[in-house]
Every structure is written in C-alpha cells, then in structure tokens.
C-alpha cells in the first residue's frame, strides 16, 4: 500500500457513528463519499446489529499466548499511537 493509504478505525467510533466514521475514512484516503456510497453504508448499517450472531469473547490464552507477552510485543505500536493522541 502507498504511504498514507492505511487508516486505523476505532471500533467504538464505528459503532457510535458509522456514517461519520466511514466518511472520515473516505476523506482520509482521498475518495469522494458519494451518495451511492452513503446509501451503501446506510443499507449495511440497517441490516446489521452488534452481536447478532452472539457475543464472541475470548482470551489470548486460548490462542496459546500470554497477555504480558502480547502487551510487550505491541508496546512500540501503542506508544506511537499514544504519541499521535490515540487512546492506545
């Protein structure tokens, strides 16, 4: 991918404001958020509900990992996100 073409989307933002979040995503990658795209988002949101297939809960231990090791491995990325103002 070209630099600047990868954008993180906060799940809580997506759930709280799907249309606004997708609009910011389109803007971030330099694409127009057309009426057709808006309609597609609205249709998708209308068909979806959180946990419609049941709530999936899991732990890192189920995958043979340790929480401390995962936190250590992702510490540099989380530090970069915090430096950018993200709640990492």
Image: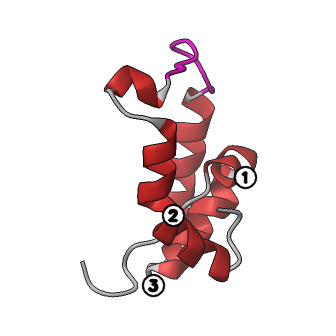
Q: Residue furthest right?
A: 16
Residue 30's mark?
Answer: 3
> Which of the image's four quarters has the N terminus?
bottom left
Q: Residue furthest left?
A: 1
Q: Dot 3 lies on which element?
A: loop
The quadrant where residue 48 appears: top right
Q: Is residue 44 above or below residue 88?
A: above
Where does the image place residue 20, in percent across and percent down from the top left? 68, 62
Q: Nearer the viewer, mark 2 or mark 3?
A: 2
> Which of the image's four quarters has the C terminus?
bottom right
Distance from Cα at disc 2 to Cα at disc 3: 30 Å
- Give me the residue at 34% from left, 26% from top: 63
Residue range of the region highlighted in magenta in the rendering:
49-58
The residue indicated by pointer 2 is: 75
Main SS class of the magenta portion in the image: loop
79 or 13, nearer to the observer: 79
The residue indicated by pointer 1 is: 17
Q: Decide: few, some or many residues near mark 3? Use Cα within 10 Å; few <14, some 14-19, many ≥20.
A: few
Q: Nearer the viewer, mark 1 or mark 2?
A: 2
Where does the image place residue 11, in percent across and percent down from the top left? 61, 48
Query: Along the horizontal axis of the image, is 18 left or right of 16?
Result: left
């Amino acid at each position: 991918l070209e630099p600047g073409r990868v954008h993180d989307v906060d799940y809580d933002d997506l759930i709280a404001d799907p249309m606004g979040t997708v609009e910011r995503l389109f803007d971030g990658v330099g694409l127009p958020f057309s009426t057709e795209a808006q309609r597609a988002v609205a249709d998708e949101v209308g068909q979806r509900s959180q946990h419609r297939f049941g709530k999936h809960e899991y732990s890192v231990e189920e995958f043979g990992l340790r929480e401390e090791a995962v936190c250590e491995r992702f510490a540099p990325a989380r530090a970069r996100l915090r430096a950018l103002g993200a709640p990492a």
